[in-house]
Amino acid sequence: MDNPFDALIFDAGDTLIYFDGKYADVYPQGDAEMLRSLQSSGFDPGGDAFLVEFRRRLRKFQEERNSEFLEYTTAYILRTLLDELGYNYISDSALRLALDARYTVTRAYWQVEPDALPTLKTLRKSGYRLGLISNAGDDADVQSLIDKAGIRPYFDVITTSAAQGIRKPNPRIFHWVLDRMGVSASRSAMIGDTLGADILGAHNANMYAIWITRRADTAANRAHRDTILPDATISTLEELPGLLRSLA
């Protein structure tokens, strides 16, 4: 039986991996470690006031990201704030150390879905080529999460919005991956949990769109539930091979 697609493109967060913690508790801890790293490098931009402003800017740029579909990286946000505070001479290495301190905290709470590795292995054995696109503010963090989850060997191409400067649902990020895999959009499917990014983005790129709902009960998805419609729906990754067989 022929496969219905040549390539399958996956989202990362809440599709292959998930955050096993409370963002409101964990991310402030990471921000505090980021500040301590800056201070250890000889920069003291302030204490709580600096962190409050940093988080405010993260929220602001998140809103702009979701309307413009352009990526403002965490590094850009942090450097811009430090520049305004007079620290325009901070080196790239010191900035990276600070970001790594932040993400080391948050990375500990990301876990691989139990059915991710078996499903990816099955798909590769079935002849599918696999790609991954993640909307994220820091490419290095996502790449580390991919390695932590042990899923890198299964993928031909892995990219992020931070690396590309554009976010799903912009079709350009989908086409970038498909071009590097040498496959057509009409012979490719996207699997992800977010209607407004993964499903709409797949349709914008003329791809088949599969919605995974295990962790998809979010306010953003509820707002789009009647307007952005997937081509197929699964609740878990282990359902995916069976769905693909039925499509063939």
Image (cartoon, rainbow, N blue to C red):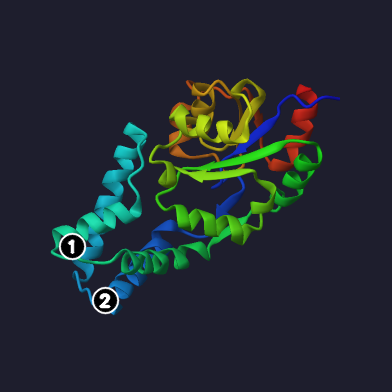
Q: On the image, numbered disc 1 is attached to which residue?
A: 88
> Based on the displayed image, in which of its 4 quarters is residue 62 positioned?
top left
Q: Which residue is most to the right?
A: 1
Among numbered discs 1 and 2, the one appearing first in the sequence: 2
Percent across and percent down for residue 193 are 56, 38
Q: Secondary structure at mark 1?
A: loop
Q: Is residue 110 left or right of residue 84?
A: right
- Residue 191 showing in the rendered view: yes
Residue at image coords 76%, 42%: 124
**Location of residue 38 in the rendering, given as x and y in whole percent from the top left corner:** 28, 72
Q: Amino acid at mark 1?
A: Asn
Relative to the observer, which residue lies in front, 156 or 215? 156
Q: On the picture, is 93 further left or further right than 17?
A: left
Q: What crowding class fits label 2: few (fewer than 14 Cα within 10 Å), some (14-19), or many (20 or more)? A: some
**Few, some or many C-alpha atoms within 10 Å of disc 1 (few <14, some 14-19, many ≥20)?**
few
* Residue named by callout 2: 39
Q: Position of residue 181 (x, y in %)?
A: 62, 35
Q: Residue at x 64, y 53 (%)?
A: 152
Note whether residue 113 is visible.
Answer: no
Looking at the picture, tell me which residue is in the foreground, 245 or 170.
170
